[in-house]
Image (tube, grey):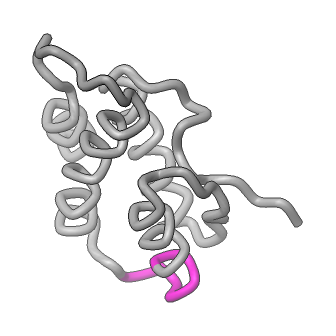
Amino acid sequence: MIRLAMLLVLLAAPAAAQSGDWTAEKCSRYSQVWPEALARFGRVGLSEEFLARHEAFLTSGCRTRDVCPRSPQEIALADVMTIAAMNAGTASSFVPFVCRD
């Protein structure tokens, strides 16, 4: 629980002026927290596919959304990142986590 609280604080942005491109601003905020989340939670239980698809999301400017969390660790990390993203002012639909099959 402390991990979650610390991660949420890290992503919550101060009331600074937003850039003209809100998607880029959201992506910037999200991208800053992702490495911290990986450091705190570790990579055990995260598949190469999950990590590669998430990297593709970041590389695309947070425009692709096809990261399917399957393992308990992937689901937990996706949940934390969804809450953190929402705390940063994004909608829950911003995050890349979706399973189509």
Image quadrant of residue 34? bottom left
User: In the rendered image of this protein, does residue 6 appear above or below residue 49?
Assistant: above
Q: Residue at x 57, y 84 (%)?
A: 49
Image quadrant of residue 42? bottom left
Residue 97 horizontal/vertical position (percent): 61, 53
Q: Residue furthest bottom?
A: 48
Residue 61 horizontal/vertical position (percent): 42, 54
Q: Magenta segment: does it hold 50?
A: yes
| Residue 1 can be seen in this image | no
Asked whether 56 or 40 is in front, the reply is 56
Q: Is residue 13 left or right of residue 27?
A: left
Asked whether 83 or 100 is in front, the reply is 100
Q: Residue furthest right?
A: 101
Q: Residue at x 31, y 23 (%)?
A: 20
- Tell me which segment is drawn in magenta: 44-51
User: In the rendered image of this protein, does residue 65 appear above or below residue 3?
Assistant: below
Residue 19 horizontal/vertical position (percent): 25, 25
Q: Residue at x 38, y 34 (%)?
A: 85
Q: Residue at x 54, y 51 (%)?
A: 63
Query: Can you say which quadrant of the picture contains the C terminus?
Result: bottom right
User: In the rendered image of this protein, does residue 18 appear above or below residue 94?
Assistant: above
Asked whether 77 or 20 is in front, the reply is 20
Q: Magenta segment: does it hold 23?
A: no
